[in-house]
Amino acid sequence: MTESSGTPGIDSTVPPSGTGCVECLQADGWWFHLRRCAQCGHIGCCDSSPAQHASAHASETGHQIVRSFEPGEDWFWHYGESQYYDGPTLAPPLSRPESQPVPGGNVPTNWQSQLHR
């Protein structure tokens, strides 16, 4: 594992896996907001999304640090410590395209009622 940023759990050279939640896209699902794994670049959906793929990825892989993949947001979250985290600039792109709608994917008409709060 390369820790090019000097921070354990973060590889600033790895690009994101795409512009949407990997698992939601494979399952024709949908997401509310996106999170980027700071170690491997996996894009997953946030914990407000029905499937919560970003935190599932962290649990399955041990990759504990994510960065928001939303335009204008640059915060990191450490799942293991349940707190915000300081991190370096990651490889571009730093967010989903601004033209991509929120929520994204195959969004149902009753999407608001399916969010986790």
Image (cartoon, rainbow, N blue to C red):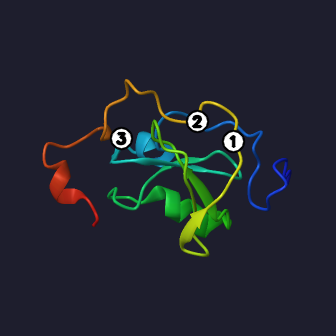
**Residue 91 shows in this picture:** yes
Labels 1 & 2 near each other (Cβ < 8 A): yes
Q: Residues within 10 Å of mark 2 (few under 14, many from 20)?
A: some
**Mark closer to the observer (1, 3):** 1
Precedes in sequence: disc 1 or disc 3: 3
Residue 28 tag number: 3
Instruction: Say what amino acid the circle numbered 1 marks.
Output: Thr
Q: Position of residue 37 (x, y in %)?
A: 62, 52
* Foreground pick, 97 / 55: 97
Instruction: Say what amino acid the circle numbered 2 marks.
Output: Leu
Q: Residues within 10 Å of mark 1 (few under 14, many from 20)?
A: few
Precedes in sequence: disc 1 or disc 2: 1
Q: Position of residue 70 (x, y in %)?
A: 45, 41
Q: Residues within 10 Å of mark 3 (few under 14, many from 20)?
A: few
Could you tell me which quadrant the C terminus lies in? bottom left
Q: Which residue is mark 1?
A: 89
* Foreground pick, 74 / 115: 74
**95 sits left or right of 4 in the view:** left
Disc 1 secondary structure class = loop
The residue depicted at 40 percent of the width and 45 percent of the height is 27
Spatial CA span between label 1 and label 2: 8 Å
Q: Position of residue 92 (x, y in %)?
A: 65, 31
Could you tell me which quadrant the N terminus lies in? bottom right
Quadrant position of residue 28:
top left
Instruction: Say what amino acid the circle numbered 3 marks.
Output: Asp
Disc 2 secondary structure class = loop
Q: Answer above or below: position of 85 versus 23.
A: below
Q: Which residue is mark 2?
A: 94
